[in-house]
Image: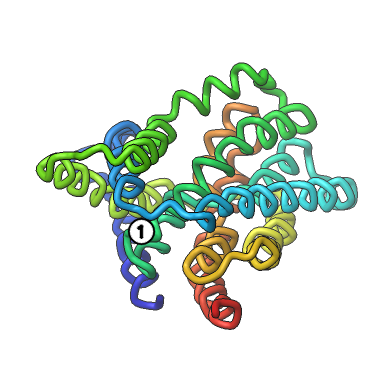
Amino acid sequence: MQNILLSFGLIILLGVAFRRLRPGGLEAPTLTRAINVTVLNVFFPALCIRALYVAQIDTEALLVPLCAGITTLMTLFISVGVYRLIAKKMELLPSEAGVLVIGAAFGNVAYLGLPVITGLYGIEAAKYALFYDLLSTTPLLWFIGVPVVAGYYGQGKRPSPRESLRTVASLPPVWGILAGIALNLLHVPIPQFMLKSLEMLGSLVVPLMIFSIGLALSLPEVRHAFAIVPAVIIKLILAPVISAMSAVLLGLDGHALASCVLEGAMPTMVLAMLIAEELKLDVSMAAFLIVVTTALSFFTLQAAVYFTGYLVH
């Protein structure tokens, strides 16, 4: 685990260096968008199709989204309650509290979670990360997380259920997962050269995801730096505990259980900055929370791995 995180840390630092040095005159936001769009539309769907096509789709894999849903909804509920209690005392603006709520509940389960899980348990464990993200946390983000935050804290337009459905349905990785499952269950033969192409395309996802995290990281000035403490505790400590308890109660074990705990322990998602901008929330607070939780996760993720050692039989 330590070697995996160190290698990820080095790639993240390369992204940070690229952001500051701007080789070739490329601006980090432009490059980040180009990478994210390409990964989302080409490399990630290819990884989903191949991973699900060769995977054994068992009961444990199908229970992972349920564990993810329990974890996400409980942390969202807790974070809303906590920041409703302390917002007035800390003189937090709604735009600041909203960012902290969304950042405490939704983690970087794809861009960091997938690389960590496949690095630890191999490509066969990718199904757990993909199911956790695309079949649970992503729909919950757009159907519940964004509407709740937009309705209570934001000034932007609150998305309708139809708009949320359109957003989720338009994600190419979701179609990649469905295609991979269908091809798997129907035993559709795929030529070896096509499988190899999918494997080569999918192999680019991990380094590009990690590099883009470094491109997106910056340390802005925020008005209430200490206000992130509850969000950090909820995201990095409470969420993996809830995920572990949920996984155990659902009867998960082995890599399925470990993957759920690690996904619960992931730092705040990078997408929080885009959501903050869209909903007219505090973008600087979002960036600050992402930086802090990402840095701390290099320690808390190792603790989560040791923690799963006591749970896995």
Q: Can the viewer see residue 7 in this picture?
A: yes
Farthest residue in the front direction? 186
Q: Residue furthest left?
A: 193
Amino acid at circle 1: Ile
Viewer can see residue 292: no
Disc tally is: 1
Residue at 38 percent across and 53 percent down: it is: 214
Instruction: Give residue 37's position: percent from left, percent from top.
Output: 34, 32
Residue 78 at x, y percent in the picture: 79, 52
- Colour setup of the view: rainbow
Q: Nearer the viewer, residue 207 or 27?
A: 207
Answer above or below: position of 185 versus 67: above
Q: Secondary structure at mark 1?
A: helix
Please tell me in which quadrant of the rendered image residue 95 appears: top right
- Above or below, 234 against 306 in this view is above
Q: Residue at x 13, y 40 (%)?
A: 191
* Relative side of 93 to 135, left or right: right
Q: Quadrant of residue 230?
A: bottom right
Q: Is residue 224 left or right of residue 87?
A: left
Quarter holding the N terminus is: bottom left
Q: Nearer the viewer, residue 230 or 266?
A: 266
User: What percent of the width, then of the height, locates residue 75?
Assistant: 72, 53
For the point 59% across and 82% down, the residue is 310
The C terminus sits in image quarter: bottom right
Circle 1 packing at 10 Å, graded few (<14), some (14-19), many (20+), is many
The image position of residue 222, as x and y in percent, is: 64, 49
Q: Which residue is mark 1?
A: 12
Q: In the rendered view, does 214 fall on the left or right side of 101? A: left
